[in-house]
Image (cartoon, rainbow, N blue to C red):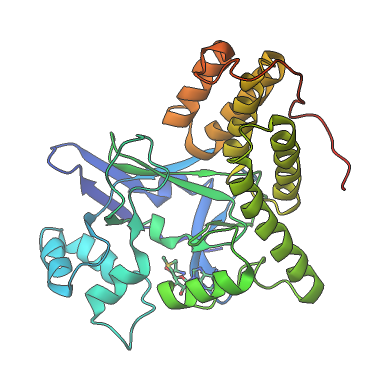
Amino acid sequence: MQSSAYTAAQAFTSQTVKFEVNIEEHEETFYVQQVPNKGQGIVAARPILRGEYLFSEPPLFTLSTSPTNSQILGALAKCTREEQCQYFALANSYRTKLLPALAIYETNFLLLGRGSLQPDAKQQDTAGIFILGSRFNSSCTPNVSKVWDELRRVMVFRTLRDVVEGEELCFNYCDVLATREQRQKELTLDFGFDCVCDACRLEDEKVAESDRRRSSIARLFDEVGCCGKEPTLGIRKIHLALRMLKEESLVHYEASFCYDAYQLCVLVSDFTNAKKWIRRAWEISCVTSGQDSHAARMFKIYYANPRSHPLAGLLPKTTLTGPDHTITPS
Ligand SMILES: C[S@@+](CC[C@H](N)C(=O)[O-])C[C@H]1O[C@@H](n2cnc3c(N)ncnc32)[C@H](O)[C@@H]1O
C-alpha cells in the first residue's frame, strides 16, 4: 500500500517556533491513500487503541468561516511555495461552482472552536486549513476525535475507539445524532458530497433502527437536563441513552451523560455512585479530548472530592445507581 509522503510545515502564528507534521513520522500508525468512493483518506497501519494520540497539526492559515476568494489568496501569499502546492493539492468538491482557492477552502476548512481545550475560547467563527487533517473523511460513526488546543494553536487528533489495521480513520462532519436523511441533507448542502459512510449505507430496517436510536439519544439528552427534580427518572434516562450510544458505537455525548448522572447523584448526596459516574466521565473525556482538556481536569477535581459540587445535597437523600447498573428494556 502506497503512502503519500509530504510535510506540512507552518510557523506558529506570531511566534518564531516551527512546528512540523510529517506523515513519514506516522507511517507505522497510519497512511494516506485512495479509499473507495471518497478520494483520499487516512487508514490505520496497525491496530490502534481507543484514546491513542494520532497527531497535532497547526493550521496553514486561519480565516473566518466564510472568507472571500481574495482573502484566501492573501493568506496563501504569506505561505511558502511548497505550502501553496500542498493547498492546491487538497480535495475540491466545488470545482464547477467556485473559484479554486475558495472551493478548496470550503471543502477542507475545520472550525477551531468545537471541543476546544479551553472553555472560554472565542473561536467559534474561526476556521483553519490543516494539510494532513484535511485528509480525514467523514463518518457518522466516527473513530477519531479532533480538538482545537487554543493554547498550543494546534488541532489534536486521537482515536475514539479501538481501530483494526486497515480500518479507515474518520471524524464526523455533522451531528451524529441526526437521522440519516438529516445528515445526508446537511452533508450535501453544506459540504457538497453524498456520504457513503457505513452508517449512511445501512439498509431498510437497519437504518430505521439506527435513526430511532439516534433520535432517542438526542431526545434523552434534552430530557435529562430537565430532570433536576426527578433524579431517579434522570438516571434511568441516562442508562437508556448510554445503552443506545453503545449499540450505535458512538462515543460523543457519553462523557456528558455521565457528568449529568454525577450531578444527579450529588443532588441527593449519593456520593458513592457520584464518584463512579465522575470517574467514568473523566475516563471518556481523556479519550475524546485528552487529559489536559478542561472537561477532564474538571472531572478529576470532582472525582477527588465529589462533595465539592455546588449542587451537593440540595435534594433529600436517596440512593441512585452507578454506571455498571444494567437496565432491562421497558
Ligand atoms: C476534507 S476532504 C477529505 C479528504 C478527501 N477525500 C481527499 O481526497 O483529500 C472532504 C471531501 O472528501 C470526500 N468525503 C469525505 N467524507 C466522505 C464520505 N463519508 N462519503 C463520501 N465522500 C466523502 C468528499 O468529496 C468531501 O468533499
Compared to residue 53, the image places residue 199 above or below, namely: below
Residue 328 visible in the snapshot: yes
Q: Quadrant of the N terminus?
A: bottom right
Q: How many marks?
A: 0
- What residue is shown at x 54% (from left), y 46% (from top)? 29
Q: Residue furthest bottom?
A: 96
Find residue 195 and report its image quarter: bottom right
Residue 70: percent from left, percent from top: 12, 72
Residue 63: percent from left, percent from top: 21, 58
Residue 319: percent from left, percent from top: 76, 19
Residue 111: percent from left, percent from top: 34, 55
- What residue is shown at x 47% (from left), y 23% (from top)? 298
Find residue 282 and report its image quarter: top right
- What residue is shown at x 36% (from left), y 48% (from top)? 22
Residue 46 visible in the snapshot: no
Compared to residue 109, the image places residue 113 above or below, namely: above
Depth check, front residue: 23 or 37: 37
- What residue is shown at x 50% (from left), y 62% (from top)? 174
Depth check, front residue: 204 or 73: 204
Compared to residue 37, the image places residue 225 above or below, namely: above
Depth check, front residue: 189 or 45: 189
Describe residue 109's horizontal placement relative to residue 67 as left or right. right
Find residue 92 and report its image quarter: bottom left
